[in-house]
Image (cartoon, rainbow, N blue to C red):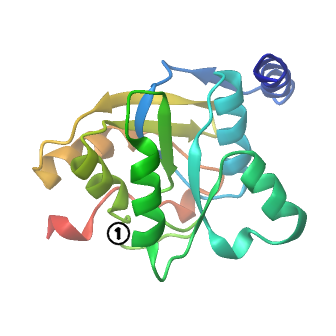
Amino acid sequence: MRSFRRHLAGLLLRAARWKAVGEVPQRGVLVGAPHTSNWDWVLTMLLAWRYGITIRLLVKQELFVGPLGWLLRRTGAVELDRKNPAATVKELLVEAEGDDPWLLGIAAEGTRSRAEYWKSGFYRISRQTGLPITLAFLDAPSRTVGWGPTFHPTGDVGADMDVLREFYADKTGFRPDGFTPPRLREEG
């Protein structure tokens, strides 16, 4: 099945004139940005399939209805109850124990519309587990989707977020006006 998915993803990306770049991480917390369109999910799945991996992607539970819910579950998505995210995260952290490949994907912007801050769950999960953060991205103008740098957060939130700001500075989503620049409320 993985071989089929890899081949299919490669064909679909080429047909849509998108290219996948970067080195796939084996374990960690993926931060995906810019998140301005539902097409982001499609490209994320194609990227994962192209590299032969499964991403445990946090998706708001309201989307898990009917055929879409079935599809989301089959592609590795995890229902997130935004009123009680701690329960979902706790289950995922147990799943992440060990040395097997494991990737948790989070759209830290939290919405496809512009907001003031990013959600800090990716940062806290990384610090709590010791898993590195990998910056995943899409860039609509260049039709590129891929993996950026991987790093271990230092605990200096401002300096760590500077890494994200620098990396995402030249990345543009499908709807540029919907992008929230990387900034956490914890930065003050």
Amino acid type assigned to the residue bearing label 1 in the image: Tyr
Task: State whether residue 10 appears in this view.
Answer: yes
Q: Position of residue 6 (x, y in %)?
A: 76, 20
Q: Which residue in the protein does label 1 denote?
A: 117
Q: Which residue is at the front of the view, 101 or 119?
A: 101
Q: How many marks?
A: 1
The image quadrant where one finds the C terminus is bottom left
Q: Residue at x 55, y 63 (%)?
A: 177
- Residue 72 appears in which quarter of the rendering? bottom right
Residue 128 to residue 149: above or below = below
Q: Position of residue 88 (x, y in %)?
A: 48, 65
Task: State whether residue 30 appears in this view.
Answer: no
Outermost residue, bottom direction? 83
Q: Which residue is at the front of the view, 180 or 92?
A: 92
* Label 1 SS: loop
Q: Position of residue 9 (x, y in %)?
A: 79, 26
Q: Residue at x 49, y 69 (%)?
A: 114
The image quadrant where one finds the N terminus is top right
Q: Few, some or many C-alpha atoms within 10 Å of disc 1 (few <14, some 14-19, many ≥20)? A: some
Q: Residue at x 32, y 62 (%)?
A: 120
Residue 71 to residue 64: above or below = above
Q: Which residue is at the front of the view, 72 or 43?
A: 72
Q: Position of residue 119 (x, y in %)?
A: 38, 66
Residue 58 to residue 159: above or below = below
Q: Which residue is at the front of the view, 15 or 25?
A: 25
Q: Is residue 28 left or right of residue 42?
A: left
